[in-house]
Amino acid sequence: MTIEELYELLRSDESYRIERTVSTGNMDKFQEAICAFANDLPGSRKKGYLLIGVHDDGSISGLKVDDVLMKKISGIRSDGNILPLPVMNTEKVETPQGDVLVVEVTPSFDTPVRYRGRTFIRIGPRRDIASIQEERILSERCAASLPTFDTYPCRQASINDLHIDIIMNQYMPQAIDEEVLDNDHRSIEEKLASLHLWNLQWNCPTYASLIMFGKNPKFFMPGAFIQYVRFKGETNGGAILNERRFEGCLYEMLPQLENFIRDGIVTNRPISISVLREKQVTNYPYKAIHELMMNACMHRDYQSNMPTRLYQYDHHIEIMNPGGLYGQARPDNFPLVNDYRNNVVAEMMRTFKYVNMFNHGVSEVQDALKANANPPAEFNVNLLTAFSVIVRDDEKSYEESVHSVSLNATCEQLKASLNPEGKLLIISLSDTIVSISELKLKPLLKPLYEKKSNTLLKDKVIYPLIKLGLVAQTHPETPRHPKQKYYLTELGKTMLAYLRSTDCRV
């Protein structure tokens, strides 16, 4: 730095870029200033200057800078108190009024920068500790300015590790205008580089090209696969009924995954809604599971060794992918705000119509689940290193399924309780509330007994039906109530329909 450049700095009114001091021993003050310049809260990307040997009014104090002071100030860069390490330059400028030690600090891309765990910033001429909101601004700026992992070069890979034919014949015609493609006579590497699939500096593929078109992406990213496990019961402590791995590049793997979701996870089964009518019930809507799995592949952290997990239990599915919320997406604004950990991968998946990148995915999932009578998906966005979502089975079909099993068991109990001789029970039921005398007069229940006393009717018919939950009393708290009547429960009504639909004569 020349004397003229120093004088220009001393005259500058950009106070947020300049800190003046005559002290030579206050190391905390120096390091806090350097930390604040590195954070560059205003986002000017202009260098900051700590001027040692200058009064607040800009006059030079007459300091004599020696090697000891130079080494002490220069050592700030690597003493480990400021992290990440700042980019700084220390220089002595000699003037007729005395020496000035100039510390030039370059704004960091990796913010927030902290001095002993605290983030310092400059607000005009003042230095202060950043608030939570200000730290968030620095974090988001860092995420926006740094390249995403999928754009990094994979220096161990070569062009032979890519399915070049797929890129040239399938992807490029969809990603690039036909006329532009016909007139593009550059080398393959230059064409790939224009799509962020190749790094010209290192002459190697990027991770994005390996993720989408690599012959063996798992070799370079050990966690780049999907693990499916079908557990018996509702926890992963149950027996494993099925296990499968989806490996390979996304171009080959995603169609397999789509088919598996459609044929291996989504099931349709008939449920009887009357004696002569049935309806088809779907456990999970295909659209919801498909959307969640596509998002998992798009947003996952490919640097992690953890696979994307698709775990299926008897009545719920859990999807977990490595990497929590990214960039501007936070627990307090999810799902209204979205950000992309893998921008290039997301763009390629959009080109192949797997995702739309409109930030409508979560709402579409919830709408599809609601239309299928499933409970809403449960998102866990508070995990630091993973993102989890649980989708539960269609509640109505689950209840009907359980009810059907219960009904079959109840029918066997009914036959065992009321027909010990193994003879076919002839039953005629009604949902009208009746008394014992009315039962005798109609009769609504006609068991194969010659004697029809009230006691026999109660002991052999009514009470067993109450015990089975098929019949209920109008005065259950007073069994001998003079106005006691009996009526069919919902289970009893269903039993009637069940018996009429079977070989039982009614």
Image (spheres, rainbow, N blue to C red):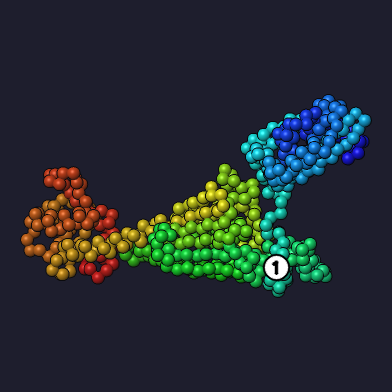
Quadrant where the image shows the C terminus: bottom left
Task: Name the residue type under label 1.
Answer: Ala
Q: For the point 57% across and 65% down, which residue is it?
A: 225
Residue depicted at x 87% and y 28%: 62
* Horizontal and vertical percent position of residue 165: 70, 74
Res 279 quadrant in image: bottom left
Quarter-of-image position of residue 5: top right
Percent across and percent down for residue 56 are 81, 26
Up the image or down, 30 lies above or below 216; here it is above
Give the quadrant of residue 252: bottom right
Question: Residue 340, how many percent across, how many down?
Answer: 65, 53
Query: 29 or 363: nearer the eye?
Result: 29
Report whether 393 appears left or right of 201: left
- The residue sitting at 47% across, 59% down in the picture is 317
Q: Secondary structure at mark 1?
A: loop
Q: Relative to residue 1, is residue 155 depicted above or below?
A: below
Q: Position of residue 192 (x, y in %)?
A: 75, 66
The N terminus sits in image quarter? top right
Circle 1 Cα neighbour tier, 10 Å, few/some/many (<14 / 14–19 / ≥20): some
Horizontal placement of 447 versus 294: left or right?
A: left
User: In the rendered image, is residue 187 in sight?
Assistant: yes
Between 8 and 470, the one lying in front of the other is: 8
Task: Please give the residue where the numbered disc 1 appears in the rendered image.
Answer: 157
Q: Nearer the viewer, residue 131 or 439?
A: 131
